[in-house]
Amino acid sequence: MPEETSREGWAAQPGPELPLAQIIEHAFDYRGNVTLALTDGALLECYVSNRNATGPAPFIEYFDVEGNGPTRLPYARIAGIRFSGKDTSAGKSWDAWAKRRDAVLAKTAARGADEGRGETAAQEQE
């Protein structure tokens, strides 16, 4: 199984190689809280729930740590993003797939065993 990479702990600063819009896309895909470094120096821990990179004033929508929101914040107020919260989905896609596979195999084996017992019982009655 290939290892999935998590952004947990990554402190991303926008620049020529990494535009803010790309960092925000990563934050949107992230399944944990992030800490936004704002242009006024404030830090805001939140969960990025939506974003709109098009239009005259791109923005994100977030829920704060108390669950209040969604609140809009213009891209222009974001200086950087730290992926500070636990990545709740990191590495779990393999585990979820393996559990589904095991459940299907168990059900198939049980069905086969039931069918096998039926044939044996029928053969014994003959």
Image (cartoon, grey):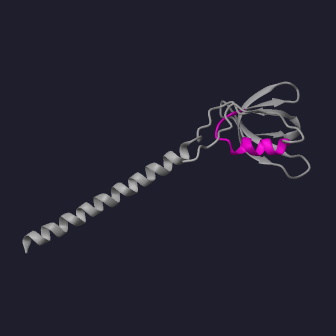
| Residue at 77 percent of width and 47 percent of height | 51
| Residue at 29 percent of width and 58 percent of height | 110
- Is 46 in the magenta? no
Position of residue 92 relative to residue 43, above or below, is below
User: Residue 38: which quarter of the image?
Assistant: top right
- Where does the image place residue 105, in percent across and percent down from the top left? 37, 56
Q: Principal SS element in the magenta part? A: helix
| Residue at 85 percent of width and 37 percent of height | 14
Name of the residue lying farthest toward the right:
56
- Where does the image place residue 19, in percent across and percent down from the top left? 85, 43
Left or right, 79 with respect to 98, comes to right
- Where does the image place residue 42, in percent across and percent down from the top left? 82, 25
Left or right, 10 with respect to 42, comes to left
Query: Depth check: 4 or 117 in front?
Result: 4
Query: Depth check: 15 or 30 in front?
Result: 15
Name of the residue lying farthest toward the front:
2
| Residue at 72 percent of width and 33 percent of height | 10
Position of residue 125 relative to residue 102, above or below, is below
- Is 22 in the magenta? yes
User: Residue 115: which quarter of the image?
Assistant: bottom left
> Which region is colored magenta?
19-34
